[in-house]
Image (cartoon, rainbow, N blue to C red):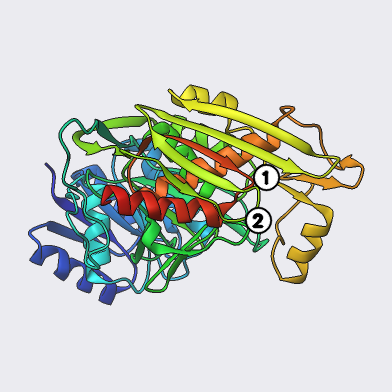
Amino acid sequence: MNRSILIVDDDASVRESMGGVLRDEGYSVSEVADGHAALESLAAELPGLVLLDVWMPELDGIDLLARIREIYEDLPVVVVSGHGNVETAVRATRLGASDFLEKPFSIDGLLRSVGRALCEDSAITVDEHGDFPAARPVSPGQPLLRQRTLARSVVGGGLGLHSGVRTGVILHPLGPGNGIRFAGVGSDSQVLAHVDNVDSTGYATSLYRDGVSARTIEHLMAALHAYGVTNLLVKVEGEVPILDGSAVEFCELLESAGVIDQDADIAAVTVDKEIRLEPGPDQFIVVTPADRLELTYELSYPDPVGDQVYTFVLDSPAAFKEQIAPARTFGFVEEIRRLESAGLGQGGLLSNFILIGEGGIVNTELRFVDELARHKILDLLGDLYLLGAPLQARVHARKTGHGNNVELVRAIAAAASV
């Protein structure tokens, strides 16, 4: 493996500090102060990795990255910026950056980014907070599945449904045993996608730990569950974009990157007896043993919506993409008014959710006659992935939401010792 690194930064103190840290870790380091010198250095000797500052005179880092990609298609580049924002990070990743770091960064954050770019990141048995055992005890006969990640980094962008702020999402591959982790765009602090880190479930599912938050994660998590992605770093500025209100674009992102098997297994979560919750009158959510994941949702609203029931069997990503992923977020006119008065729903546009009034659907044509029930299954599938591993069970829910889903996940986790 080529462990040589070229640092491109016009700040001598930054070059010196980064170079010192990396040399102490056994890397061979060279340094240049501008983009033109970088191109000359690359022509003379190709390193294993480039650490590239964004703000430089004459030829800035983004333009230099584009030039590097034209000449050296597979050379890993980590972009570093003292003025990091989601637009810069998304642009850099679309140009082929392996990662994005915001100054000032920690030594651990730098080394993790370098390790990921050079494919040196190792499995995490238990992270520094003790929040995720990568290798749980496996019971006899418990199904083992191949761990999966993405073949390369990909990005998507849009509005946050509740913040109304333009945001983006950057998906980076991770090595076996790391789980699904969310981080800020320019930060090395992370929060694991696990039920222990759920912060709120009002209108969406959000994570929080040690200053790191990730909001409205359920549609992305549903796609990751369906495609069997077990290890991934998700960089997002606060809230995952709502896109068109469904998970179709997340499916397309995963497929554009390529989902690959890894040289490690993960035990699927199973149950050996019924677990039942009855959160209110005419409401229930129950899980029973099964050798696959089967989800049934019963939706019941007053007219003009009425009753809808749908059952989905997760037997392939294609089935999810066809039957569940296109189902969009929905809301009622009065509910939207309450959200707005609470400062939420600011990114809700007529093009990214189904608006229901007294006379029926206000703003769109339904993609399925039972699209609302299918969307509830989409949310359920995402929330269930907060178990930290794929689930094999039969789940039947009636008139339940995110809070009930998370309560069920906690009950399953306790019963399965997850």
Q: Single out the residue that lies furthest toward the bottom.
A: 13
Above or below, comparing residue 138 to residue 407 in the picture? above
User: Which of the pair 339/63 is nearer the observer?
Assistant: 339
Image-quadrant location for residue 144: top left
Image-quadrant location for residue 71: top left
The label on residue 354 is none
Q: Nearer the viewer, mark 2 or mark 1?
A: 1
The local secondary structure at tag 1 comes to loop
Q: Amino acid at mark 2?
A: Leu
Residue at (65%, 61%) from the top-left corner?
Answer: 162
**Badge 2 local density, few (<14 within 10 Å), some, or many (20+)?**
many
Disc on the earlier residue, 2 or 1:
2
Q: Single out the residue that lies furthest toward the right.
A: 359
Please name the residue that numbered disc 2 is placed on: 161
Above or below, comparing residue 395 to residue 187 in the picture? above
| Distance from the alpha carbon under mark 2 to that under mark 1 | 10 Å
Q: Amino acid at mark 1?
A: Thr
- Residue 117 percent coordinates (x, y): 26, 48
Left or right side of 391 for 279: right
Image-quadrant location for residue 254: top left
Residue at (16%, 50%) from the top-left corner?
Answer: 122
- Residue 296 percent coordinates (x, y): 55, 33
The label on residue 329 is 1
Q: Single out the residue that lies furthest toward the front.
A: 281
**Badge 1 local density, few (<14 within 10 Å), some, or many (20+)?**
many
Residue 106 appears anywhere in the view: yes
User: Which of the pair 123/65 is nearer the observer?
Assistant: 123
Above or below, comparing residue 207 to residue 169 in the picture? below
Left or right side of 296 for 235: left
* Dots 2, 1 in contact, CB < 8 A: yes
Quadrant in which the N terminus is drawn: top left
Left or right side of 18 for 391: right
